Image: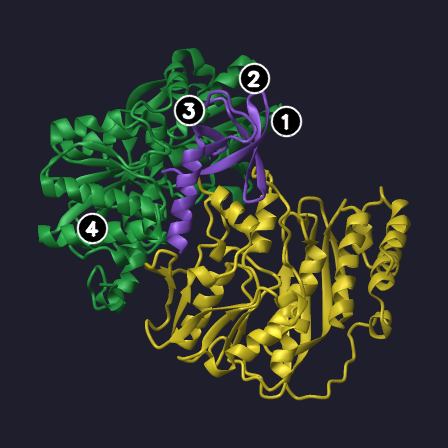
Chain colours: A purple, B green, C yellow
Amino acid sequence: MCVAIPVKIVSVAGEEAVAEIDGVRRKIIVSLVADPKPGDYVLMHAGFAIKKWTEEDVREFNEILKGTKA
Amino acid sequence: MKQSDFKQHLDGIHDIADRLARPVKIMEVCGTHTVAVCRSGLRSLLPSSLKLLSGPGCPVCVTPAEYIDRAILLSRRPEVLLATFGDLMRVPGFSLGTLEKERASGARVRVVYSVSDALALADERKSAKVIFLAVGFETTAPGIAWAVKTAAERGMKNFAILSALKTMPNAMEALLQSGGVQIDGFICPGHVSTIIGSRPYEFICRKYCRPCVVAGFEPADVVAAIAMLLGQIEEGKCEVQNQYLRAVSAGGNPKAGLLLEEIFEPADAEWRGLGVVPQSGLRLRDKYKNYDAFSLYPDIKAPAGAEVSGCLCGEVLRGRIAPPECKLFGKKCTPTTPVGACMVSGEGACAAYYRYAPLAEAGGGDESPSFFKRR
Amino acid sequence: MNRQAFLNDVKMKNDQMILLSHGGGGLRSKQLINEVLVKRLGNPVLNMLDDGALLTLDRKDIVFTTDSFVVRPLFFPGGDIGRLAACGTINDLVMMGAEPRYLSLGLIIEEGFSLRDLERAVLSMREILDVAKVKIVTGDTKVVEKGAAAGLFINTSGIGVRLANADTRVSNARPGDVVVVTGTLGDHGAAVISCREGINLDSKLESDVAPLWGLIAPLLTQGTELHCLRDPTRGGLAAALCDIAEASRVGIRVREREIPVRKETLGVCRLLGLDPLNMACEGRAVVVCPERLCRDVLRMLHSHPMGGNARAIGVVEEQPAGLVVLETDVGGERIVEMPMGDDLPRIC
């Protein structure tokens, strides 16, 4: 278990943030990660950000997706 | 990781499997791994000597039937509005049916995507008692802890959770302790490990000498992890390796960990198919008893029941038998009429196997059908 | 029909509700029928408001179909229950190789339903009927007590005239055939589930609900020998393919990377743990045709505004008979199963 996907933070307001993936947005809670900012990528599960991703992480993920679709 | 890496790992897997020249059983503990493996058709690409077993990391499968019955009884209380993840809607209890059927009969059961939606619901509907069915592992637990803490801070009186939350490492130990287990290595849950880190699996290596690799969920992640595991098996090593570097660190998520500590305490928990596993559940601390639906409704007693005789989920979950070896498999027990834990959700061992049976049969009965094999 | 004029017209009816007496058969019923249904949908046959519609059809092969619409929410991005009710039945006729001609309209309205919403739905139907050149010639209206219907239920039955030699039944697929889809999959299902309560997703995704006659007619009239037509509604592409494979007793093999899915639809599916192959479409068709005609079929589809994303996604084979095999993005294979039913978001 568990479905978690990388999403991009669009805006933050206290404990809540608006996150986006593939043009779809949802409000999520960011209290479980430190200092979330717009532009950050986070791993999101059931409406909660559980880990912040670095640029490197995002790159690796995109490589994996691209690679397996080549 | 490029396409060439995916192929490289796959080739590596075949090479090692050829050299080992014996059956190898690897358990993917996590139900989401089972789904990832199924969806990508990975099984059809792996060597036939390698068996991937599905473990107990499927919260839907291991939620006790009695819990479902209790949830159904709660939903019949006029003031109760049950909020739940979609995953639970079709799980059968012992005798009272499913939440899906209950909703059809008029009960207030609402599917939500997040516990934060349930909290918002409670905020909106002050006259209803919103009870959230808290089912899941360490990935989901911190969010639920946040919801309880937030409800307490706001002094909310109409929100509660019914906890069936569980923790993974103890369940893995219970599996190994029960003896006669034929598992050569573990693919450890990726997102549970985001929270708890990779360290908690070290005891499996120390005590039970089984290699562990924490894996991500893309097919490329899974083959990389399997290749790492086979490498360890070939070299006789047993360590915890982390394939899922972008999501998992050795220490996990400290904020989430602290929150869990604050709100929950370990308790013995029943796992459908495995029985009671000590200290493997999460229970609300006394301070938060007002948000615990067990405490708020002590008079709700689910009718006693027992699993249908002949159900061999326990044996399947321990990797001792393959699903078709259970006499109920495919007959009394099918995905649309599930009897036991392993068939209940699409990620259960038996449900996943059921999907592959047709392919296998088309290929002539072999588990990894040569009809469709790539090598 | 001027939309602005309509909106002005309805402004004053804003606070009006449907009452039980509107379904009673008396004066109020007549008022509702005349002021909403005849006004928005009227034509010489309907306007007679007789017990039945007298129609003369010049051909022998009549296709007759029925469908009921209970979608929630009633109004969703890209459409509403009215649009769906018109397209759903029109498309069933098209899938049978028939030119849609006439529909009946059965309304079951919950007491207290907003008159404005009823008119919105009826207007949506009118827009589709005009495009598809189909008339509603008979109907029935009932009003039920509060709680007995979720706002509005619609049934439409339809009659079409089958084109000569068109046999597009689900049992007609043959080994060697090619499987084509007319556009992106899963948009309707994803659009509807995103706005369901408790899910709260915000996206630009719109339902694909649309009438298929304009898109499919050229394929049928230009003597193209189509073997099967199936619209992937409930259960999505997965259900449509499984139906064809089972009824025709053939194997169907499709390639994941050929299946067109919109980025936003994929986003919704990934968020909710759903499979785009299982999500409903209401303006798409699966076309099974002989291999030699595939290029022509694609050319005709691409030349229509609705068919820009048409793609050949797979082939029909002898084995495994009755099953659908998906070649995944990573080169693996798995069986595509008949979906369970209602899509529920997963976190596991």
Q: Are marks 2 and 4 on the same chain?
A: yes
Q: Residues within 10 Å of mark 3 (few under 14, many from 20)?
A: many
Q: Secondary structure at mark 3?
A: helix
- Give the residue type at disc 1: Glu
Q: CA distance from mark 3 to mark 4?
A: 38 Å
- Give the residue type at disc 3: Pro
Q: Point out the frontmost of discs 3 and 1.
A: 3
The residue located at (76%, 84%) in the rendering is C56
| Numbered mark located on residue B142 in the image | 3
Where residue C346 sits: x, y (%)? 45, 42
The answer to whether residue B184 of the structure is visible from this angle is no
The answer to whether residue C153 of the structure is visible from this angle is yes
Read off the residue under disc 2: B156
Q: Point out the frontmost of discs 4 and 1.
A: 4
Q: Secondary structure at mark 4?
A: helix
Q: Residues within 10 Å of mark 2 (few under 14, many from 20)?
A: some
Read off the residue under disc 1: B124
Q: Are marks 3 and 2 on the same chain?
A: yes
Q: Secondary structure at mark 2?
A: loop
- Write down the chain letter for disc 2: B
Q: CA distance from mark 2 to mark 4?
A: 56 Å
Q: Are marks 4 and 1 on the same chain?
A: yes
